[in-house]
Amino acid sequence: MDLSELEKIVTAGESATVEFKKPTVQLTRAGETLCAFLNGQGGCVFIGVTPEGRIVGQQITDSTLREAAAMLARFEPPALVSQERLRLPN
């Protein structure tokens, strides 16, 4: 995914299969949403995007990545969830 693809998704707004989370502090909530998506028709959670659809970005540390991986490992049954990081200008 590149920035123009992200901007298109953000412009369309949240939906039954797209949710925005501004900070990684909401990682638990993002996990709950992913779990709901997995039990439904699938979907994507975008961290670093405000609920109003503004791309603000988020600093991601190795600790955050480990926390996300640990959260995903607790899904039962195990689920294939892909993660992408997009470097934003500035």
Image: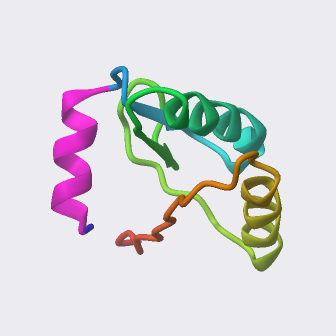
In front here: 33 or 40? 40
| Residue occupying image coordinates x 74% and y 48% | 75
Is 77 inside the magenta-drawn segment? no
Rendered image coloring scheme = rainbow
Q: Residue at x 66, y 68 (%)?
A: 60
Where residue 70 sits, quadrant-wise, is bottom right
Percent across and percent down for residue 14 are: 35, 25
Q: Residue pushed farthest bottom?
A: 62
Image quarter of the C terminus: bottom left
Which residue corresponds to the image point at 45% horizontal and 32% vertical from the top-left?
19
Q: Is residue 61 left or right of residue 90?
A: right
Q: Is residue 24 above or below residue 30?
A: below
Figure label count: 0
Which x, y percent locates residue 44?
42, 43
**For residue 61, what is the image quadrant?**
bottom right
Residue closest to the far front:
77
Secondary structure mainly formed by the magenta segment:
helix
Residue 17: horizontal and vertical position, in percent? 37, 30
In this rendering, position of residue 38 left or right of residue 63: left
Residue 56 position within the rendered picture, expressed as x and y whole percent measured from the top left: 46, 49
Which region shows up in magenta? 2-13
Q: Which residue lies at the image location 68% right of the left edge and 55% below the top edge? A: 78
Relative placement, left or right, of 40 versus 63 is: left
Q: Is residue 3 magenta?
A: yes
Instruction: Give the quadrant of the N terminus.
Output: bottom left
Q: Is residue 81 above or below residue 23?
A: below
Does residue 2 appear to the left or right of 33 in the view shown? left
Report the front residue among 54 and 34.
34
